């Protein structure tokens, strides 16, 4: 609703929409003049030292955005310089420490600054370093798998000078036999693999993990069950395995490949072992995963 009002400052009549409050001034200029806020004074810029005019209510330190920005740049430079000085002091104190080491080539003991330990840590001079890198010895070995003799060039800087296998094929066979014969090696391998899988789960596994967290059920993810199995989710004595359609041989992918058939045999063998250990195993295809399916499995 439009009404006429009279300005308190200039006395002019003006029309405004009445929004539940009384209009007293026709403009912001009149309002400031009436309230005493339009008075201006002279300030001096802190950066360029030039005088400038501004409203009294605003205490202005700089005459423009350029001056205020340049002061911030100068302050950051000063702070960076102070930090650099402090950092250099700490580095000097740490780099003054010396460790005594023994040269791998000539056997002499020598001192190494901590700042140079990463590049000159094991050799007393460049001459010894170069001789260690470029001098090589031809040694004869016997393969542990096939029993054939073979020769290898061994450098002084090699970390593993004792070669045990003649080829990558024999090396893979050796690691496989270690996995099945050495329980300590198998335990170490499975623990490292389970920790790796915890941080690199598939999309269906992460979806199931999110569903269980939303329901509020405590579970163990990628649990290593001795001797040789890693399960996706373990809830007390209930195990949930999320199987991919292709890799685990879904009926839609028939006829199955040799790799898929081998995987199905491994899954059956794993389920038999876990049931004998007292676990209840449920396998869910990745395309059938849902919150209702998980609740139906966990419901008593």
Image (cartoon, rainbow, N blue to C red):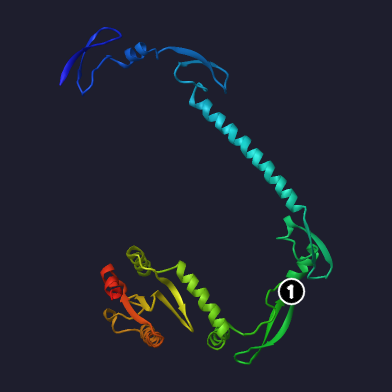
161 or 133: nearer the viewer: 161
Percent across and percent down for residue 288 are 27, 72
Looking at the image, which residue sits at the far right? Answer: 108
Label total for image:
1
Secondary structure state at the residue bearing disc 1 = loop
Q: Is residue 54 above or below residue 225?
A: above
Q: Is residue 23 above or below residue 249?
A: above
Q: Dot 1, crowdedness within 10 Å: few (<14), some or many (≥20)? A: some
Look at the image and tell me in which quarter the N terminus lies: top left
Looking at the image, which residue sits at the far left? Answer: 1
Percent across and percent down for residue 233 are 39, 73
Q: Residue 287: in sight, yes or no?
A: no
Q: Residue 204: in sight, yes or no?
A: yes
Looking at the image, which residue sits at the far front? Answer: 300
Q: In terms of image quadrants, where is residue 244?
A: bottom left
Measuring 55% from the left and 86% from the top, which residue is drawn there? 173
Q: Which residue is mark 1?
A: 156
Q: Is residue 91 above or below residue 253?
A: above
16 or 110: nearer the viewer: 16
Q: In terms of image quadrants, where is residue 221?
A: bottom left
Percent across and percent down for residue 239 are 37, 77
Percent across and percent down for residue 27 are 29, 15
Q: Is residue 287 left or right of residue 74?
A: left
Look at the image and tell me in which quarter the C terminus lies: bottom left
Q: Is residue 134 left or right of residue 164?
A: right
């Amino acid at each position: 609703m439009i009404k006429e009002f009279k300005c308190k400052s200039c006395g002019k009549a003006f029309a405004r929409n009445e929004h539940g409050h009384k209009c007293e001034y026709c403009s912001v200029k009149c309002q400031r003049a009436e309230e005493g806020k339009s008075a201006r004074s002279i300030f001096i810029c802190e950066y360029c030292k030039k005088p400038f005019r501004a409203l009294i209510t605003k205490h202005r330190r700089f005459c423009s955005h350029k001056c205020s920005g340049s002061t911030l740049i100068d302050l950051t430079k000063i702070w960076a310089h102070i930090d650099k000085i402090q950092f250099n002091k700490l580095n000097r104190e740490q780099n003054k420490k010396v460790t005594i080491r023994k040269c791998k080539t000539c056997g002499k003991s020598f001192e190494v600054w901590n700042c140079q330990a990463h590049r000159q840590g094991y050799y007393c001079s460049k001459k010894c370093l170069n001789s260690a890198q470029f001098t090589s010895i031809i040694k004869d070995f016997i393969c542990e798998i096939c029993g054939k003799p073979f020769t290898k060039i061994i450098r002084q800087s090699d970390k593993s000078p004792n070669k045990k296998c003649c080829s990558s094929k024999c090396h893979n066979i050796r690691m496989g036999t270690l996995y099945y014969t050495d329980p300590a090696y198998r335990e170490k391998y499975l623990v490292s693999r389970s920790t790796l899988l915890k941080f690199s789960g598939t999309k269906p596994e992460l979806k199931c993990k999110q569903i269980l967290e939303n329901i509020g059920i405590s579970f163990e993810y990628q649990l290593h069950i001795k001797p040789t199995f890693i399960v996706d989710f373990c809830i007390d004595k209930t195990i949930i395995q999320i199987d991919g359609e292709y890799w685990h041989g879904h009926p839609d992918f028939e006829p199955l490949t040799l790799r898929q058939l081998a995987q199905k045999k491994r899954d059956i063998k794993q389920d038999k072992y876990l049931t004998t250990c007292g676990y209840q195993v449920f396998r869910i295809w990745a395309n059938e995963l849902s919150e209702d399916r998980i609740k139906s499995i966990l419901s008593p």
